[in-house]
């Protein structure tokens, strides 16, 4: 399974107040680039807000955890754990939303699913393998982890969500890293690629997170599909150019590169709640430490109601 491919809810397409992009390849893209120069200060402020985040939700996609044969990649997983530990060493709280259950299950069984039922079964195999690997990898730093499996119903139900939030608060107080995934075995509608992008934004908002970082196999949001378009350029920041960026993303998305849409929607959604969202490459060296240093990494979605961006 790849790292996300469905379009999801499209309720985030409203204009915001500032934006920056790099140079762009098409006339339509140029609009997004034009708005860029508007407010470099707001971008710096957003990067600083991201750097100062005390509570960070990190979302890792399947491609960030598995190899080309869909086997769980311990080197990728160890890197993610190293990066998270960089944040924890700075005194930050980290909640991880991890995909990879179905992907790891496919690798484990050596069989790609034909049906939803088979994908559900594969998720149960991969999820336990995933958690074993996380437990062992975090143990290198004497850090304990906890598994939380959620469905959209749990997030929509206020009582259930209160319980989830209380559990996460307690785990964080104890210094444990909560690792969240969709409960694929019991909710077939949860098995769509990209759902963890929605789930991670809901979690970030619901637990009063300060930052959502979505780690993926591309370096952020581009003016085209970077896997096929040599002219595609990274868009540094998204704000007032959101509609233009959304149009570029819609245009460049294909079945194999559709996952960026749900990531954009997730980052946009948290930005509407006043927290920055960053989409960055999981392969980038020290990616989370660099974000915590306020460096320009990936694409940042500027917080719309943030104190620095009014
Ligand atoms: N819950 C799925 C899994 O762990 C991934 C869904 C998604 O990528 O959003 O395999």
Image: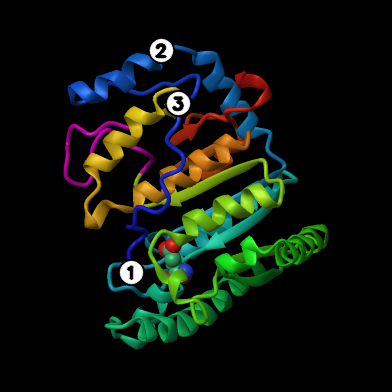
Q: Secondary structure at mark 3?
A: loop
Which of these two is toward me, 251 or 141?
Answer: 251
The quadrant holding residue 104 is bottom left
Residue at left 43%, top 48%? 263
Q: Residue 112: x and y, percent?
A: 28, 81
CB of mark 1 near ligand 1 (< 8 Å): yes
Q: Is residue 48 above or below residue 74?
A: above
In the displayed structure image, the side of residue 305 where residue 13 appears, left or right: left
Q: Which residues are magenta?
A: 219-235
Q: Earlier in the sequence, mark 1 or mark 2?
A: 1
Cα distance, mark 2 to mark 3? 16 Å
Measure the C-alpha gap from mark 1 to mark 2.
Answer: 38 Å
> How many neighbours does mark 2 have within 10 angstroms: few (below 14), some (14-19), or many (20 or more)?
some
**Element type at mark 1:** loop
- At 45% across and 79% down in the image, what residue appears? 123
Q: Could you tell me residue 88's position as x and y percent?
A: 69, 50
The kind of secondary structure element at disc 2 is loop
Dot 3 alpha-carbon crowd within 10 angstroms: few under 14, some 14 to 19, many 20 or more:
few
Q: Quadrant of ligand 1?
A: bottom left
Residue on which the image places disc 2:
37
Nearest to the eye among marks 2 and 3: give it.
3
Residue wearing tag 1: 1
Picture disc at residue 15: 3
Q: Which mark is residue 24?
A: none
Mark closest to the chain's N terminus, 3 or 1? 1
Residue 83 seen in render: no
C-beta proximity under 8 Å, tags 3 and 1: no
User: x, y percentage for residue 91?
Assistant: 75, 46
Residue 176: in sight, yes or no?
yes
Q: Is residue 195 magenta?
A: no
User: In percent of the image, x 18 and y 25: which residue is there?
Assistant: 26
């Amino acid at each position: 399974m790849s790292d996300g491919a469905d379009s999801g809810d499209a309720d985030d397409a409203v204009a915001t107040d500032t934006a920056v992009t790099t140079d762009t390849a098409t006339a339509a893209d140029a609009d997004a680039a034009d708005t860029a120069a508007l407010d470099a200060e707001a971008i710096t402020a957003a990067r600083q807000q991201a750097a100062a985040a005390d509570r960070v939700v990190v979302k890792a996609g399947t491609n960030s955890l598995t190899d080309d044969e869909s086997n769980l990649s311990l080197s990728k997983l160890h890197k993610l754990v190293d990066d998270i530990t960089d944040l924890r060493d700075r005194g930050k709280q980290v909640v991880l939303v991890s995909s990879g259950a179905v992907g790891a299950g496919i690798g484990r069984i050596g069989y790609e699913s034909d049906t939803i039922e088979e994908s559900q079964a594969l998720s149960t195999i991969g999820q336990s393998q995933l958690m074993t690997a996380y437990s062992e990898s975090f143990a290198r730093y004497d850090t304990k982890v906890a598994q939380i499996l959620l469905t959209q119903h749990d997030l929509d139900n206020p009582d259930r969500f209160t319980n989830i939030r209380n559990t996460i608060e307690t785990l964080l107080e104890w210094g444990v890293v909560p690792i969240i995934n969709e409960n694929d075995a019991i909710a077939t509608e949860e098995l769509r690629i990209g759902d963890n992008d929605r789930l991670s934004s809901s979690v970030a908002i619901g637990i009063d997170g300060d930052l959502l970082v979505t780690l993926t196999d591309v370096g952020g949001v581009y003016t085209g599909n970077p896997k096929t378009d040599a002219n595609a350029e990274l868009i540094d920041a998204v704000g007032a150019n959101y509609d233009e960026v959304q149009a570029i993303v819609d245009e460049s998305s294909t079945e194999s590169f559709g996952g960026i849409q749900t990531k954009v929607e997730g980052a946009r959604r948290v930005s509407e709640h006043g927290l920055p969202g960053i989409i960055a490459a999981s392969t980038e060296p020290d990616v989370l430490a660099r974000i915590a240093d306020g460096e320009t990494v990936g694409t940042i979605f500027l917080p719309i109601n943030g104190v620095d961006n009014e």
